[in-house]
Image (cartoon, grey):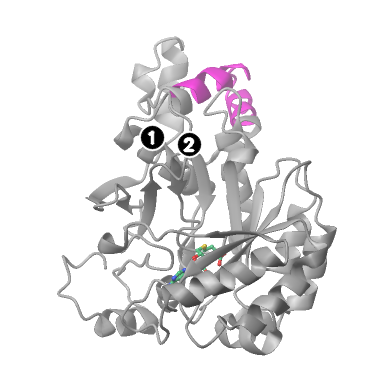
Amino acid sequence: MTSIRPDLANLDRPALEAALEERGQQRFRARQIFRWIYSRGVTDPAAMTDLSRQLRETLRAEFSLTTPELVTRERSVDGTEKFLLRLADGQQIEAVFIPDTPSMTFCISTQVGCAMACAFCLTGKMGLVRNLTAGEIAGQVRVLVDALGMRAKRFNIVLMGMGEPLHNYDETMRALRILNDEHGMALPPRRVTLSTVGLLPGLERLAHEPLMPNLAISLHAPTDDVRGELVPLNKKYGVKEIIEACERFPLARRRRITFEYVLLAGVNDSPGAARQLAKLLSGVKSKVNLIPLNAAPGIPFERPSDAAIDGFARILSEQHLVVSVRKSRGRDIRAACGQLIVDGQRRSPGQTLAAALRLEPSAGNARL
Ligand code: SAH
């Protein structure tokens, strides 16, 4: 039998304390180790100089520490950067850095691919390959901080990369606890936004989390008939149930739930839809984030005209909703919303289809 070495990247501090104790070490050493890994960016135990030689040897011999490997980094004309990262098993994911939104934002993945299959999303075409571990989720942040030289800087995190965070609930929340640890990055939950397509059981669990990120709901349509066409999961958890769950959701003072709404020409962008949306959200402390579709080959929808986008936004604000239109970032490097897709070694039928439908010459075999 081979003994499995715990991966330091996967352990929140209480788990690391327990693992140290089991090996005859003092629990409080976990704080020092967290400081090395998360606030100083040091991953080699040999370099953790305030630990005893014996503890460094224990870390080396009895633990591992995996960090996603940076494969390529692409910079958009608008400053957005897309990072292609390789995981220990060879699977690849993408993470995106978006500068000045107005703050710095990291868009992080929670799964390789996604099972939700939303009709306008390229990641959805991949299908779900696997969940990420907490270490892989938090590891994306470590890699981006390092690569961007942002150790002392503030940044926000949006769980809006590949995957559905509530479909990988435990690992996602553990990653947030790791990132939040006061001896590590000390990232406050108000700097984190979790975006979900509306997995209700996960949403109910989230409502009881001690560590509560901001919530964004990918709504995309005010009625079940339209939403059902766009978001397959709507057949299980419909619009009314989602809105009711949002009305019950405990919000900190001055907080609002963001409702993301991808605007698709002729599908969900009519003035009538805007009025229905306003009515639907009248009982929720909400803000609406309109996302004009990022079109892509293989996505059977079009982006509405600027006039239609403005008209839709105007109706919502006339109905007293807080509205913003998401500026598309990094479209030239396919880093924009819904454009994150990686060709794995094992392609699912959806991946093959997405790859085949790509019209541009591909810039290498690893990404769109
Ligand atoms: N699965 C989560 C996290 C993904 S967040 C969720 O659905 O909320 C990514 C956001 O970008 C979601 O609101 C998603 O609906 C949106 N999106 C997906 N494809 C898009 C596209 N082609 N153009 C614009 N936005 C898109």
254 is higher (above) or lower (below) than 325:
above
In reply to whether residue 21 is colored magenta, the answer given is yes
Dot 1, how many residues are within 10 Å of its Cα: few (below 14), some (14-19), or many (20+)? many
* Nearest to the observer: residue 12 or residue 61: 12
* Nearest to the observer: residue 225 or residue 140: 225
Look at label 2 and name its amino acid. Answer: Phe
Q: Which of marks 2 and 1 is in front?
A: 2
By secondary structure, the bulk of the magenta-drawn segment is best described as helix
In reply to whether residue 215 is colored magenta, the answer given is no
282 is higher (above) or lower (below) than 24:
below
Is residue 2 visible in the rendered image? The answer is: no
Q: How far apart are marks 2 and 1 (CA)?
A: 9 Å
- Who's the residue at 55% across and 36% down the image? 179
* Nearest to the observer: residue 91 or residue 211: 211
Name the residue tied to disc 2: 155
Look at label 1 and name its amino acid. Answer: Val
Residue 116, percent from left and from top: 55, 75
Disc 2 element = loop
- How many labels sit on residues? 2
Residue 111, percent from left and from top: 48, 61
Is residue 116 visible in the rendered image? The answer is: yes
- Name the image quarter holding residue 20: top right
- Name the image quarter holding residue 176: top right
Q: Say whether marks 2 and 1 touch (CB < 8 Å).
A: yes
Magenta range: 16-36
Disc 1 element = helix
Q: Which mark is residue 145?
A: 1
* Nearest to the observer: residue 353 or residue 90: 353
Residue 171, percent from left and from top: 58, 51
- Who's the residue at 74% across and 68% down the image? 200
Disc nearer the start of the sequence (2/1):
1
